[in-house]
Image (spheres, rainbow, N blue to C red):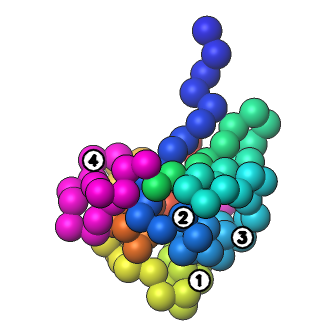
Amino acid sequence: MPAPNLFLIGVRDAEAATTFYSDLFDIEPTFVSPRYVAFDVGPGAQFALWTGYSEHAVPSTPRTCEVGLMVPGPPSAVDEVFTSWVSKGVHVVEKPHDAVFGRTFVVADPDGNLIRVSPVD
């Protein structure tokens, strides 16, 4: 059975979300349409933005899942990403702290989707 290879995030405005994620992750989309944008994030894996859930993609809607970015290196590497992202004006949900799996923090995109940075498992 194949492993999951598409990670889809609901957004209200595909163009604005593309700008946000392109800047945040320093990546460019590999497919762009008015309502759907995809980024290649690894061999056979894509991260995509879609306006198909736009009525639910509002910051006040509670989120129960997160986009994850695992950072190699010591705990200070997570803190360095936090400092960089704060300088870009991200909305901080949880400041850097030590969790059972290591140093971590959470920010939200303009639609309220959560993004967690943590160490590599």
Q: Which range of residues does the magenta coloring cover?
A: 52-73
Q: Residues within 10 Å of mark 2 (few under 14, many from 20)?
A: many
- SS state under label 4: loop
Residue 64's disc number: 4
**Disc 1 or 3, which lies upstream in sequence?**
3
Which residue type carries mark 1? Answer: Ser
Which residue type carries mark 3? Answer: Asp
In this rendering, the label closer to the viewer, 3 or 2:
2
Distance between the alpha carbons at the discs numbered 2 and 1: 23 Å
Q: Percent x, y for residue 78?
A: 54, 68
Q: Quarter of the image containing the N terminus? A: top right
Residue labelled with disc 1: 84
Distance between the alpha carbons at the discs numbered 3 and 2: 17 Å
Identify whether 57 is placed above or below 107: above
In this rendering, the label closer to the viewer, 2 or 1:
2
**Disc 1 or 4, which lies upstream in sequence?**
4
Q: Would residue 50 be seen by someone viewing this image from the given angle?
A: yes
Q: Is-magenta flag for residue 71?
A: yes
Q: Quarter of the image containing the C terminus? A: top right
Q: Is-magenta flag for residue 115?
A: no
Circles 4 and 2, Cβ within 8 Å, touching? The answer is no
Residue labelled with disc 2: 14
